[in-house]
Amino acid sequence: MSLKASEFIQNPDGSVYHLNLLPEQLANTVITVGDPDRVDQVTKYFEKVETKVHKREFHTQTGYYKGKHISVISTGIGTDNIDIVFNELDALVNIDFKTREIKEQLTSLDIIRIGTSGAIQEDVPLDAFLISEMGVGFDALLHFYDSDKIVNTNFAKAVKEQLQLKETNGLPYAVSYNEALGSKFHDGFLKGVTVTNCGFYGPQGRKLRLPLSMPKLNDLMASFEFEGKRITNLEMETAGIYGLSKLLGHRAVSLNAIIANRATGEFSAHPGETVDKLIKLSLDSLVS
């Protein structure tokens, strides 16, 4: 059945609505970054860039790194944007843009997030690289999808109980990374559990002028332990990436440059250099 125009929206040139991309402009390996300017930081290492498309905060470049076909796309900040980007990435490979029908044979993408993050454990050093074995969503994105089969309900319940979350906070969701894709990124990476927050200030325990409803939340996260796992860091996309990727049949992993440590109050003296090192290591790991 053909998808309705109001559900699967195409631009006048046939491209998908927000990303402005046509299917032939996307590689099967996709690197996501939050900052549109970081797309150039990644593709400066490519030997060839064949496609450059941008619309709003969504900038895409597709080309080749050491012979591997890769697309790099900026998502902007937050899981609300992840909802847009990941549904439209999936549409590019799994919907026929002419008939507007879902394809019988589906394609699975490899998706690698390269982003920044703040540690909440004292022993996670500044400028370290961390791979998220699990993402814990403090946003509501996955609750709008039929996602019970892919979430770790016991882990999510333990988070809610140990962090003393209120009913108004809702139930967090917990989703694991793709182990097969994650196995490519081992040398030089720590492993941890990443909390995905719905904001940068209050939701991550930062107080400027507004009082916080849960001022001890970060301390509770730092003391969390369940089945031998602890929460290591905070950011704003990983859990949504893991959830939507699993639901859509794609493989995803989130790689974090630790540029802040909330436990010690420190911030990296050279965050740009740290991110650049993570980009190069990630690219080389992909093709090794």
Image (tube, rainbow, N blue to C red):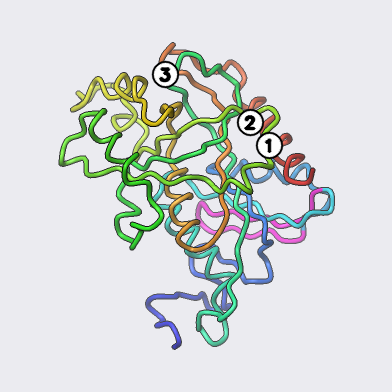
Instruction: Tell me if 237 is positioned left or right of 103 in this view.
Output: left
Q: Give me the disc on residue 177.
A: none
> Is 249 or 270 nearer to us in this picture?
249
**Mark 2 vs mark 3: in front:** 3
For the point 66% across and 64% down, the residue is: 26
Q: Quadrant of the C terminus?
A: top right
Evaluate if marks 2 and 1 touch, with contact meaning CB atoms under 8 Å apart: yes
The residue wearing badge 2 is 275
Instruction: Tell me if 262 is positioned left or right of 160 in this view.
Output: right
Amino acid type for the residue under numbered disc 1: Ile
| Magenta region includes residue 36 | no
Instruction: Tell me if 117 is positioned left or right of 222 in this view.
Output: right
Amino acid type for the residue under numbered disc 3: Arg
The residue wearing badge 3 is 262
Q: Position of residue 191 (x, y in %)?
A: 55, 30
If you read the primary sequence from the N terminus, does the residue marked by circle 2 or circle 3 appear first? 3
Magenta residue span: 50-65
Q: Residues within 10 Å of mark 2 (few under 14, many from 20)?
A: many
